[in-house]
Image (cartoon, rainbow, N blue to C red):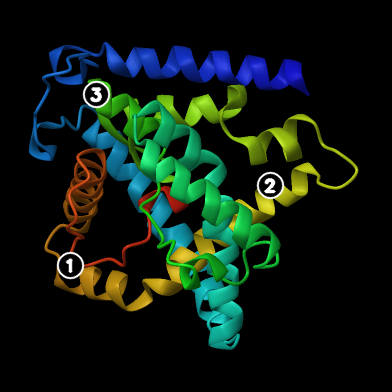
Amino acid sequence: MNKSVSILTLLLFLILNTFAIAGDDGNLNVNKNNNNGYKDVKDCFEKVNRGIFAFNQTLDKIVFKPLAKGYRIFPQPIRAGTSNALSNLSNVVTIPNNLLQGQMKKAGVNSARFLINSTLGIAGIFDVASYYGLKKRDKEDYGQTLGVWGAGPGCYFVLPVLGPTTVRDSLGSVVNLIGGDAWYNVTVVNDTQYFSEADYYASRLLSGVDFRAKNLESFDSLENSSVDLYASVRSLYLQDRYRKIRNIDKTTDTLSDDDWEELDTQ
């Protein structure tokens, strides 16, 4: 299993580096003074991206949207508990990225929240930490950390099933495969008697369905009001990532405050 992960990581690295050096438009610029806005991100492979986007839209209509509608049948407390548990689990990636970005206070708060909610909150189903004044903080990931460190986004592209990303964000996701995600390590890499590979992929699928269910109306509204849905989704994704990297407390008007990374490989 470890050999397979190593080979996959190497292939991803080589592919993404090809994207990164695909001409001036796709340069992965490392510059701590890089203040380029989301509008400067280049869509180097737009024709291919649009084809993959169309495939994803079809898959969404056939699979994910019906699943999201079915998920909404469950009572709200069950869905809220599921969202809480998934959010709590995401702290295993958020906390190390808080530390890597020098956000010591946030790292402390998130660590306390994870400890309290994992125990008193029964695996994070109940957000007990909020009752103690430990409010939920924004999620962080390795793509954001690379951005904070000065890495430019590189090309924008769309992955089959997983959706929008950039070279920088994809490289950040690769870090999960080489030890950056404790949940991935416990379930997929080690595959213990308590947790298995199936648990990891089930949690990722559930994250995607939960995200889709929260945004059914928002996505429908976006689709109905957009002259070019592909361009609208691209803009929203890049705005969201720009805001998160710079810790701007302003959410987009169209989608809920949940991370686009729910659909990514984090």
* Circle nearer the N terminus (2, 3): 3
In which image quadrant can residue 253 be found?
bottom left
Front: mark 2 or 3:
2
* Circle nearer the N terminus (2, 1): 2
The residue positioned 38% from the left and 75% from the top of the image is 216
Task: Please name the amino acid that badge 3 sits on.
Answer: Gly
11 and 178: which one is in front?
178
Residue under pointer 2: 200
SS at badge 3:
loop
Q: Provide residue 222's location: percent of width, then percent of height.
A: 22, 69
* Circle nearer the N terminus (3, 1): 3
* Residue 47 position (above or below residue 118): above
145 and 171: which one is in front?
145
* Residue 92 position (above or below residue 5): below
The circle on residue 130 is none
SS at badge 2:
helix
Residue under pointer 1: 253
Marks 2 and 1 sit apart, C-alpha to C-alpha, by 31 Å
Residue under pointer 3: 154
Q: Provide residue 138's location: percent of width, then percent of height.
A: 36, 52
Residue 78 visible in the current orientation = yes
SS at badge 1:
loop
The residue positioned 34% from the left and 48% from the top of the image is 53
Q: In the image as oriented, which residue stretches furthest toward the right?
A: 193
198 and 98: which one is in front?
98
The residue positioned 67% from the left and 22% from the top of the image is 5
Task: Please name the amino acid that badge 1 sits on.
Answer: Asp
